[in-house]
Image: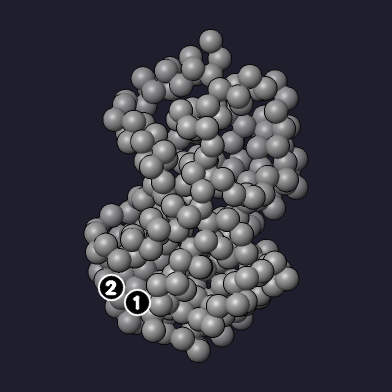
Amino acid sequence: MQTIFITGASSGIGRETAKYFAQHGWRVIAAMRNLQKAGDLKDYANIVLTELDLLKPEQIRSACAQALEQWDIDVLLNNAGYGIMGPFERLPESEIRKLFDTDVIGTMLVTQQFIPHFKRRRAGAILTTTSLAGIIALPRDGAYGAAKRAQQGMVESLYYELKPFGVRVMSMIPGGTKTNFQTPVNDLTGFEEAARRQRAYLLHGDAEFPGPEEAAEVIFNAVHDGRDQVNYPTDSVCRALYEDYLSQNYEDFKLHFAKMLFD
């Protein structure tokens, strides 16, 4: 039985991906901060729950080591994380540090635990859930977007480091997704109208954001498609926005985007 280790599996994309892989015959190591939030994941015979808080380096090392001792893990999905949003000068230092300790440092520490395993077996895949905010800079995303760009930088560097060992490294890129994604800081001050327009841009004409079920299917297909590809937008809306962004010169895009937000 193939095995995937998923962080942040208690909700949203992580939860749906855990279910999707389990339903397709995989063993899923579902890691989360609070095991009380596992819900119906505990009802799956092939889902193993494990406690993991990205703010606790010792717990990261012990949880990953225990999983690697018990199972020949095929895939790591770095999915745990959260966001903060607000005008950059209004973001508290403590919140910025906690965000980076979780989304960036925690993700990096988990990834480090799995690299020797994948290199030894000369196979496997490391996937990281980043964000469209890590590709396209958005107002009020100065900290969150920077954290996601840091993840993106890790992914792109590891692509080269691990390619000689037959290990795939991929970035799963959601845009706006209909989940309970946590944003404990969400300050609109001075950007109320821009935020409304930004939301409309991210909806791309739809009434609501895509659900995490579409992302789960994209992640599953990315693991199986055999492509030499790094970036995978995780839904059709994000894919359209991503491709439109790549089709433009950045300097032209920024003028167009600023006009859309503020004129």
Residue 30 is drawn in which quadrant? bottom right
| Residue in view at x 40 percent, y 77 percent | 25
In the picture provided, is 92 more to the left or to the right than 134?
A: right
Badge 1 crowding class, 10 Å Cα cut-off, few under 14, some 14 to 19, many 20 or more, is: some
Residue contact between numbered discs 1 and 2, judged by CB atoms under 8 Å: yes
Looking at the image, residue 86 lies above or below residue 113: above
Look at mark 2 in the image and give the residue it sits on. 165
In this view, the residue in front, 56 or 1, is 1
Badge 2 crowding class, 10 Å Cα cut-off, few under 14, some 14 to 19, many 20 or more, is: some
Question: Is any atom of residue 149 visible in this view?
Answer: no
Residue type at numbered disc 2: Phe
Residue 43 is drawn in which quadrant? bottom right
Q: Tell me, what colour scheme is on the image?
A: one colour
Question: For the view shown, which residue lies furthest in the top direction?
Answer: 263
Look at mark 1 in the image and give the residue it sits on. 119
Residue type at numbered disc 1: Lys
In this view, the residue in front, 214 or 56, is 214
- Residue 73 in percent (x, y) is at 43, 79
| Residue in view at x 63 percent, y 46 percent | 83
